[in-house]
Image (cartoon, grey):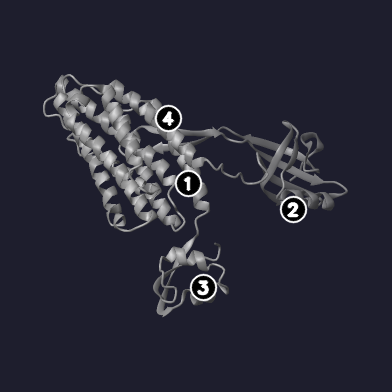
Amino acid sequence: MSFTLDNVSAASFAGASFLVESNSVTGGRKNIVHEFVNSDRQVIEDLGRKKRTYDVTAIITGDNYERDKRKLISVLESKDVGVLVHPFFGTIERIKPLNYTLNEGFSELGVAKFNIKFSISDLISVPTKAKNTASESKTKRDVSVKKANVDLKDKWKIPKSIKNGIAKIKKLADKFESASKKAKEKTAGIRETAGKIKDKAEAVKEKADELDAKINNVKDKAASIAQQVDAVVETVETLFYNLETAYDSAKQNFDSFKELFNFGDDDDEQLEIVTAKTIEVKESNEVLNAVVQTYALNFAYASFLTTDTTNSTIEEIEFQESILEAQYDKIILNSFQNGSLSLETLNSLTDSRATFNTVIKDIKTKVPNIEQVEILNPIPLRVIEYKYYGNTNRFDILKSINKNPNIEFYQGEVNLLNDNS
């Protein structure tokens, strides 16, 4: 641990002085590398500039050794940010010590050597998410699908593959017809009731009927639509935005968009005879499939963020996240392999995904952490609550996460909040 005054420089943090024997600085970009199965390609997602970290070897010595050492330890363990006076980088504000190690030896009493890692904290407290994050996701969605529209306009080929074009347009209409049918089935029983609930169900049916009318129009005019690329783009756009209003809940919207994740996955990719026509058919199919799937993922991102997750568990949310992430990977990989989507479109989809990930991370911090316990004999919910927590402060939320209206009779698997909730 030996040192000389010739190879140290004066420094301080939050008013605690020390000597610096050596230092290093780490910086760069915040990157996430996405690799894909059966492909030698990868995507590096840039999340912005990484804040610098300053690694300092600090020395405390001198007549006030113990006092100065305790003062430095105190500011390093404080929750507050402070000012670092660095021998090479000067005065750096909003510095937070991340960790430190202290080394003292019997061979050199009165000398303490600290290895300290500092970094910059832009905010003193954890930032609060803006209230319009769900609308921000919709804005990203709209930008992304507009980019996809450009690819569809550029790559949808008509003259040599009109029969294929008509078949693909009808297949698209069939997919949306299935979703519309499910929307009306969900409200059929409700419409027999009275009051506001019935009125809401009737409104949903009207929206579904409106979607049906557009779907039937697409089927009737499939031949005409397939020969006009602008009409193909308008058809895709119209069907998606109408499907969004055909359900009465974001959860139902989300489920309907997921059903479109596999559009075109069952196409026969093998070309029996390679001709200009068959190549054109394949390329047209690939771009329509990619655009529809890109629309579906963007709309799924936006709808999931407005879904009521009050009674959801972290595991349930993360399961849906995994489905969305698998769809994202599939779109990226397919586009790398067949060139169906431009890099500009893929970048806008990645931007939409990044917004979703930011918001969903915040949502998950507000989700109760639920664990299940086995109740052998029937027992009232308030008794269960008091037994596990010693009070009945959680009664309303326990009732909601169990979905059992009979609060006097709970048996079998019962959902409880863990001790950290």
**Residue behind mark 2:** 105
- The circle on residue 205 is none
Mark 1 or 2: in front is 1
Q: Mark 3 or mark 1: which comes first in sequence?
A: 1
x and y percentages locating residue 356 in the rendered image: 45, 41
Q: CA distance from mark 4 to mark 2?
A: 62 Å
Q: CA distance from mark 2 to mark 3?
A: 54 Å
Q: CA distance from mark 1 to mark 2?
A: 49 Å
Q: Nearer the viewer, residue 93 or 361?
A: 361
Q: Nearer the viewer, residue 335 or 382?
A: 382
Mark 4 or 1: in front is 4
Assess whether mark 2 and mark 1 are in contact (beta carbons under 8 angstroms): no
Q: Nearer the viewer, residue 345 or 260?
A: 260
Q: Is residue 69 above or below residue 57?
A: below
Mark 4 or 2: in front is 4
Q: Is residue 126 above or below residue 404?
A: above
Mark 2 or 3: in front is 3
Which amino acid type corresponds to the residue marked 3 in the rendered image? Glu
**Residue behind mark 1:** 360
In the displayed structure, does residue 212 sit left or right of residue 344? left
Mark 1 nearby-residue class (10 Å; few <14, some 14–19, many ≥20): some
x and y percentages locating residue 291 in the rendered image: 31, 31
Q: Mark 1 or mark 2: which comes first in sequence?
A: 2
Residue in the image at 38% along x and 52% along y: 319
Callout 3: SS: helix
Assess whether mark 3 and mark 4 are in contact (beta carbons under 8 angstroms): no
**Residue behind mark 3:** 385
Assess whether mark 2 and mark 4 are in contact (beta carbons under 8 angstroms): no
When asked about the image quadrant of residue 327, the answer is: top left
Q: Mark 4 or mark 1: which comes first in sequence?
A: 4
Which amino acid type corresponds to the residue marked 4 in the rendered image? Val
When asked about the image quadrant of residue 55, the answer is: top right
